[in-house]
Amino acid sequence: KFSGASWKGNDGFYYSSYERTKQGSVLSAKNDNHKLYYHKLGTPQSADKLVYGDDAHPVRYIGGYLSEDEKWLFISTANETYGNALYVQDLSKPGSPVIPIVTDMKNSHYIVDVDDNFFYIQTDKDAPTNKLVAAPVAGPQMANWKTLIEAKPEVLSASSVGGSIFCSYLKDAVNKVYQYDHSGKQIREVALPGLGTASGFSGKKEEKQTYFVFTSYINPATIYKMDIASGKTEVYKESKVQFDPKDFESKQIFYTSKDGTKIPMLITYKKGLELNGKNPCLLYGYGGFSVSLTPYFSTSVIILLENGGVYAVPNIRGGGEYGEDWHNAGIKTKKQNVFDDFMAAAQYLVDSKYTSRDMLAIEGGSNGGLLVGACITQKPDMCKVAFPAVGVMDMLRYNKFTAGAGWSYDYGTAEDSKEMFEYLYHYSPVHNVKPAAYPATMVTTAD
């Protein structure tokens, strides 16, 4: 559970595992004591070697992954969904110890690339929108880091391929991508086909080409091939979906939330839409865990649009669209900002005559399910239909089951303090249901 597998040659792989839960509580038991193991092919799992983790330190998340040359094993550990420690082990020397790079878990860090001299690390330490640093292989601790690419106002996500580092920046929830060398010098801006989401730009050191996917709410996902040396791009594979983007429009607006904060929202609809308040509209949100909602093509959304509907996605606080400051503006005792942002998005759509309350549906899953649950219990007349999926609905006890304890960075827990208990109780959906004319609501969940 919550594990990848990182292969070492053809002999075996590293993976993470929890202890088996007691019979009868497999679906609800709290997840603790995550451990990293090595499994050698052809041997029983009972013989697997424990690499990292012990019962005295029940870290909630542990992951291990290898460098491309399989010389280095990197280990990431975390107690919550934000912040991680980072360790490294030299696999070229049998019996090498696990060396700490970062231990305090106060910030997020991950390895982007490795060469003979440096580990290249993306970090938000003293950089809420992320920066790229070089950590000497001989002494990778934070005191020895050198900044290669300074933080910008836009949020950075870095990857590597073909001897280059690619930096994707999020500007108002759409991507711009730049190519750098390992000294931090910019080589070029990558030519993207429009405003939308570009992902990929990763692969092995010897590659001469790289691939990326571009999509938006009205552009089906298309794969592009890029020549790393020249920067030239060409279409590699197009979607076969029968849909003409020219018939539709996707535009970004900024609306004002309850406390005056400007929030971006992408609104997508068929060209020629009449703003008469009679159009069915689906408003989708998330607002948590530093997750960024970026434009993507969905055939189910297209069905709505082709039938005269409107699809709206606001980038509310709690997400990662503007970095860690934006995330932190929607956590713990600031969680109400997230609900206020979403309710203000609904009000904007009604006031601007895209739709009306009688034609509006709202949707969200997981943390977004909490969003929908909190909004309809606080403002039952916000919309006509509500779709909360796999929602975190009991805010006083969510941390006692499955992976819930790991979500406390965003939510806080009822055990933290009297203030935190009262704050959670004030908005917890199951504790705030009362006789009211609620929207038609379909609650979905899963094992």
Image: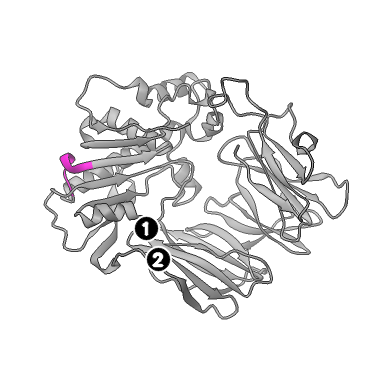
Q: What segment is highlighted magenta in the picture?
A: 355-360
User: Which of 146 and 59 lies nearest the eye of the viewer?
Assistant: 59
Residue 151 lies, with reference to residue 230, above or below; the image says above
CB under 8 Å between discs 2 and 1? yes
At 56% from the left and 81% from the top, the residue drawn is 230
The N terminus, quarter of image: top right
Q: Where is residue 144 in the image (x, y as percent from the top left)?
A: 74, 54
Q: Which residue lies furthest to the right in this view?
A: 94
SS assignment at label 1: loop
Residue appearing at x 20%, y 32% in the figure: 381
Q: Which mark is residue 297?
A: 1
For the residues carrying marks 2 and 1, which lies nearer the camera in this image? Answer: 2
Measure the C-alpha gap from mark 2 to mark 1: 11 Å
Q: What residue is shown at x 72% (from left), y 39% (from top)?
A: 36
Circle 2 residue? 239
Q: Looking at the image, which residue is at 24% across and 66% down?
A: 247
Q: Give, as a three-letter code, the residue at label 2.
A: Ser
